Image (spheres, helix red, strand yellow):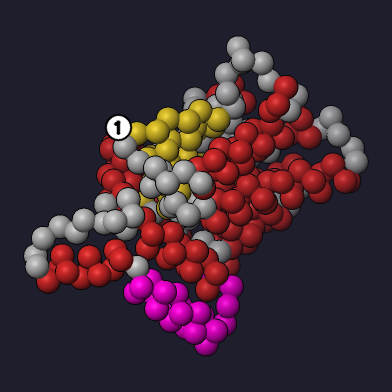
Amino acid sequence: MTESTRTATEEPLVLREDKEGIAYLTLNRPNQFNALSEELLESLQNELGRIADDRGVRVVVLAGNGRAFCAGHDLKQMRTQSERDYFQQLFRKCGEVMTAITRLPQPVIARVHGIATAAGCQLVASCDLAIAEEGARFAVSGINVGLFCGTPSIPLSRNVGRKQAMEMLLTGGFISAQEAANEGLINRSVPLDQLDTEVEKLARTICGKSAASIALGKSMYYKQLEMGVDQAYQFAAGAMADNMMFEDVGEGIDAFTEKRPPSWKDR
């Protein structure tokens, strides 16, 4: 069943709630630990596309309904297929969703509880920021069923060190939330009863900044990661020069020198 054929009486695969500039997206397959079926990937990509053009959204929070954040690809759905082209298209679609997160003008915060495994761990690594509850666990566990997590290795290896990434990929073993924080996969872990408060606090802090400068900065940050140092400096210098032309920068500097809160033009 594709997203277009779902009936009005069925629960959406991705729930969305907007609150004061924050779009909360919740993966909604709780009985399947929010496994990334074809339909869920499509639904998530559609929501991200809508948010990209929504100037009212300043920050996105990505969460999972039920007992887990995301258990990766839907293995049962995958076992109904046998054609290589199908799997290539599936993994390509998943990569497009992950790339859409990094290309979104707004920062995306992963709110992680329970487990984040395989493509679910990939989802965490693809988000700009991540906060997890202390009991959360992370793994790229495809190797346990004979499948090396090739696509999850891409954002994973851009978040954690090579040795740690390879150990996770080769063993399929779990790491704790504290280990994930130590390795750079997430920003920090907090007690479960503080998770929502901590996520909202981070989101509200970002909401208080210039939206135009955040969008430019996020785009610049990911592009320069793929460049050599000399090229990256040239690119970043141009981006900062562009940023200096923003009305918000003049307002920010004036507010700083006048010892008052800034009044951003692009909010």
Q: Is residue 7 above or below residue 106?
A: above
Residue 242 within the segment the image draws in magenta: yes
Q: Which residue is mark 1?
A: 193
Q: Residue at x 46, y 43 (%)?
A: 54
- Residue visible at 67% across and 37% down in the picture: 42
Q: Quadrant of residue 168?
A: bottom right
**Image spot of residue 31 (x, y percent):** 59, 21
Q: Position of residue 208 (x, y in %)?
A: 26, 52
**Which segment is the magenta one?**
225-245
For this orientation, the residue located farthest to the left is 259
Q: Quadrant of the N terminus?
A: top right
Q: Is residue 201 magenta?
A: no
Name the one closer to the observer, 104 or 212: 212
Q: Nearer the viewer, residue 130 or 46?
A: 46
Left or right: residue 50 versus residue 78 is left
Q: Amino acid at mark 1?
A: Asp
Where in the figure is residue 99, as x and y percent of width and height? Answer: 61, 54
Rendered view: 41 above or below 106? above
Q: Is residue 44 visible?
A: yes
Residue 202 visible in the picture: no
| Main SS category, magenta section | helix
Q: Position of residue 203 (x, y in %)?
A: 33, 46
Identified at 74% across, 50% down, the residue is 92
